Amino acid sequence: MVTDQIRGPKTAEMGEGSDAGAVLCEACGPRCAEFGEAALRGEGVSVAYGPKVIIPPLDVAFPKEKITAIIGPNGCGKSTLLKALARTQPMRAGQAFLFGQPMAPMKDTEVARQMAFLPQSPQAPGGLTVEELVSYGRYPHQKGFGRLTDQDKQTAAWALEVTHMEQFSKRPISALSGGQRQRAWIALALAQDTPLILLDEPTTYLDMAHQLEILELLQTLNRQQGKTIVLVIHELNLAARCAHWMVAMKDGTVRAAGTPEAIMNADMMREVFNLESLIAPDPWTGRPELVSYRSR
C-alpha cells in the first residue's frame, strides 16, 4: 500500500489539507459564501449533444483542499459534467470558476497550471514510453523551446515513484496491462503538479488492491500537500471511504450533495440507484458502507 509519507516535488512546507477549511453546506448555492470559495464551481452549467440536452442548468461546487466523489448510475451525466468543467466539452450555457476566477477568458496553459484532468480511457501516440508520457505533464510549466528542466525531470520521477511505475518507465504504453496503463496516466496527471486534479473513473481496470492503493495515494496527496481532488467513481464504498464530500447525480441533475454520512443512506440509494440497500458503519473506518442491496 501507499506509504503515509510522500514527499512532493516541491520543497516548501504544505498545509494540512484535509484538516483545513470548512466543507460546503448541503444546500450550498451561488449565494453562499462557501460556494464562492470552492476550488472549482459551475453556475447554470448545461450541456447538450446536438439537440439533446444531457445536463439541464445546474449549480455545483467542489470544496478547496478536499476530496470530492461524484457518484450516480451509468449515463447520468457524471463524466459529461466533469468534461464541461475541464473545458474539454463545450457548455450549452453557464460558466465555470477556477479558484474564484472565471475560466472562460483564461488561456489553456494558465488553466493547465492550476488544474489537471484525466479523462476516461485516454489514448497515447504509438510507441510512446511511460517516461515520455509522464514528461508531457510538464508542458504547462515549460518555456522557450520546451526542454525539460531539472525540476521537470525531478517532478516526473516523483510521479513515477509514487504510482509505482519506475520499473516500467522505459516500456511502451502499448506493452502495459490495463492496470499499469491506468497508473501511467495517473502519473501524468500528478506530474502536472497542480493544486486541483480531476479524475474520471481512475480505478477503472484496477484490481481491488490497486484501487485502494490509488485512492490512498490521493488521500495522502490531499492530506500532505493540500491537493483538491475531484473524481468520478462507481465503487460507492471506496467513494465513501476516501471522500470528504459527495455529489450524487441522476438524469443530468444533482440530486444530493454532502458528506458521506449525509449521502450514503437508504433514501439516496432508492432515489439515485432505484435499489433497496443495507448500509452500516465500516468497522475499520467508521464511514458508511453499502453492505448489501437488491432491486426494488
Image (cartoon, helix red, strand yellow):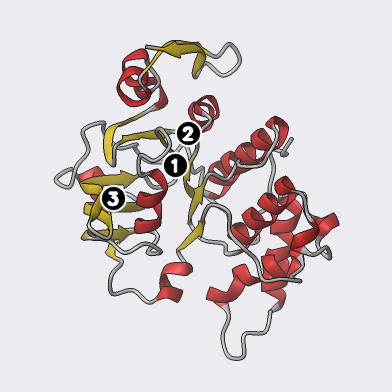
Residue 175 vs residue 260: left or right? right
Residue 40, percent across and down? 34, 53
Identified by mark 2, the residue type is Ala
Residue 102 vs residue 121: left or right? left
Badge 3, how many Cα within 10 Å: few under 14, some, many 20+? some
Question: Dot 2 corresponds to which residue?
Answer: 243
**Residue at (58% x, 46% y) in the render:** 221
Residue 209 appears in the figure: yes
Question: Dot 1 corresponds to which residue?
Answer: 66
Badge 2 element: loop
Badge 3 element: loop
- Quadrant of the image for the N terminus? top right
**Residue at (27% x, 37% y) in the render:** 254
Residue 186, percent across and down? 63, 53
Residue 100 appears in the figure: no
Is the residue under label 3 in contact with that under label 2 (CB below 8 Å)? no
Badge 1 element: loop
Q: Earlier in the sequence, mark 2 or mark 3?
A: 3
Identified by mark 3, the residue type is Glu
Question: Dot 3 corresponds to which residue?
Answer: 37
Q: What separation in Å lies between label 3 and label 1 (alpha carbons)?
A: 12 Å
Badge 1, how many Cα within 10 Å: few under 14, some, many 20+? many
Q: Earlier in the sequence, mark 1 or mark 2?
A: 1
Is the residue under label 2 in contact with that under label 1 (CB below 8 Å)? yes
Considering only vertical position in the picture, is 189 above or below 256?
below
